[in-house]
Amino acid sequence: MDNDTFWDVIETARAGAAASGEPFDEVLVTQLAGRQRQEILEYAARFDEVHDALYRWDVWAAAYLIGGGCSDDSFMDFRAGVIAWGRQWYERVAADPDSLATHPEVVEEASAPDRSETLFYEDVNYAAAGAFERITGDADAFYEAWREFRGAGTENREEVDMGEDFDFEDDGEMNRRLPRLAALFIGAGAGT
């Protein structure tokens, strides 16, 4: 599945969720379940590539600010949430994580009295597996097909260049690197 087709799948699911009021992840699973198994596996491979491309310290710092902290698992869910927002937002975040300060849901989250996990969308990570289960009735069918699709010995991924590591607890550093998000979540000029 090429990049354009992948994003067409995401955008179609977004439109379907908006029209039906159903959760995006459920619409995505339904949409994927209507495809051939090979296409679902190709979707999963492209999802991994897109998801992995956001595995960077600056994106993690943005998630940390928005979530009031962010574990490894939460960061997986955050990246899935960015994908669920569609191609335009994904590309904006990939180019400049601080651009999240203009996303309406992020702005709303900044003014909420308690932080929620609405921007951390775990279920999107498992849409391909959910589609396979729906069409086969077997919860393990996807993982068996995935191992075969990826081939033996591909479990060892290359080490990812996450960019420069920095201290998410250092308000001055966060304000310097992500000034708009820092202004929303820790206050303008924090740590300066």
Image: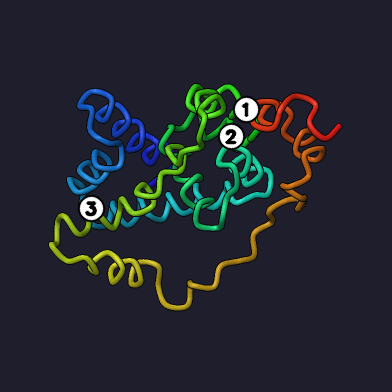
Q: Quadrant of residue 16?
A: top left
Helix, strand or loop at mark 2: helix
Q: How many marks?
A: 3
Give percent across and percent down for residue 65.
63, 39
Residue type for callout 2: Val
Amino acid type of disc 1? Ser
Above or below 38: residue 15? above
Say which residue label 3 marks: 131
Q: Is residue 68 left or right of residue 178?
A: left
Q: Is residue 130 toward the left or the right of residue 88 in the image? A: left
Picture layout, residue 56 above or below residue 141 = above
**How far, Cα to Cα, is label 2 from label 3?**
27 Å
Among the 4 quarters of the image, the one containing residue 102: top right
In-image side of 30 versus 2 (left or right):
left
Label 3, residues with CA under 10 Å away: few <14, some 14-19, many ≥20: many
Q: Position of residue 179 (x, y in %)?
A: 74, 29
Of residues 95 and 175, the one nearer the viewer is 175
What residue would you read off at disc 2? 93
SS for callout 3: helix
Q: Which residue is mark 1?
A: 99
Q: Residue at x 50, y 49 (%)?
A: 51
Q: Residue at x 24, y 38 (%)?
A: 27
Question: Mark 1 falls on what kind of element?
Answer: helix
Identify which residue, 152 or 111, lies in the foreground: 111
Q: What is the crowding at mark 1: few (fewer than 14 residues within 10 Å), some, or many (at least 20)?
A: some
